[in-house]
């Protein structure tokens, strides 16, 4: 027996779904990559069934849960990542703070944000590459704002397949390179995800 027919959704319903997804990401329930994918699908949703499917695995309302007995205010402040004549990397599932300072002095830093947990609000990364390099990887669908300067080096943002959807997470990178470089790269969606999106 077939259920009730799916109803068309409005722009306001799509916006409300994206707000809930961003809240869930701020609670640590979604990674950058998951948030970017779901926001894109939310803006493309035509029916309430498609929209509801995006939050089936999330609680109905936002309920901030302290992590390890620590209040969520721990996301405020600055996280440091240093590589002096060596290498440092952050990848897999890790908690990103609102502000991150990266210093690569004759070394290299690799920040992979694709499976990272989002803080509430935007992410600001200040990267110093002095005779070294900093690579920042973000999932497709994240808005990246790259600024700064390079002296005898270079800063680049690569792999943008098109403009991110409205409401996409924002990563602001201030890159300062002296005989070094800062690269921001976007990961393309896999074939399975592309089919799901279509």
Image (cartoon, helix red, strand yellow):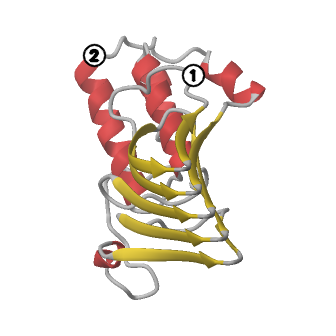
> Would residue 170 be found to the left or right of residue 90 on screen?
left
Q: Quadrant of residue 10?
A: top left
Q: In this rendered view, identify the residue nearer to me: 148 or 194.
A: 148
Q: Which mark is residue 10?
A: 2
Tags 2 and 1 in contact by the CB under 8 Å rule? no
Residue 183 position within the rendered picture, expressed as x and y whole percent measured from the top left: 58, 46
**Residue projecting furthest to the right:** 191
Above or below residue 81? Residue 50 is above
**For the point 58% across and 41% down, which residue is it?**
139
Q: In this rendered view, identify the residue nearer to me: 21 or 105.
A: 105
Tell me the residue that label 1 is attached to.
Answer: 161
Q: Is residue 111 visible?
A: no
Residue 79 position within the rendered picture, expressed as x and y whole percent measured from the top left: 43, 75
**For the point 58% across and 72% down, which residue is it?**
105
Q: Quadrant of the C terminus?
A: top right
- Mark 2 secondary-structure assignment: loop
Residue 33 position within the rendered picture, expressed as x and y whole percent measured from the top left: 57, 44
């Amino acid at each position: 027996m077939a259920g009730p027919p799916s109803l068309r959704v409005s722009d306001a319903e799509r916006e409300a779904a994206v707000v809930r997804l961003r809240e869930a990401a701020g609670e640590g329930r979604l990674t950058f990559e998951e948030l970017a994918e779901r926001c894109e699908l939310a803006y493309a949703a035509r029916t309430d069934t498609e929209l509801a499917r995006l939050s089936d695995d999330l609680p109905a309302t936002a309920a901030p849960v302290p992590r390890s007995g620590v209040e969520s205010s721990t996301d405020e402040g600055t996280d440091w990542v240093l590589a002096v004549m060596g290498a440092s990397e952050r990848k897999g599932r890790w908690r990103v703070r609102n502000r991150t300072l990266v210093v690569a002095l004759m070394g290299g830093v690799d920040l992979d944000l694709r499976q990272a947990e989002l803080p509430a609000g935007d992410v600001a990364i200040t990267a110093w590459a002095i005779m070294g390099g900093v690579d920042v990887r973000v999932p497709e669908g994240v808005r990246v704002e790259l600024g700064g300067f390079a002296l005898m080096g270079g800063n680049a943002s690569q792999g943008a397949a098109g403009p991110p959807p409205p409401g996409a997470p924002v990563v602001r990178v201030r890159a300062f390179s002296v005989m070094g470089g800062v690269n921001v790269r976007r990961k393309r969606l896999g074939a399975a995800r592309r089919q799901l999106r279509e």
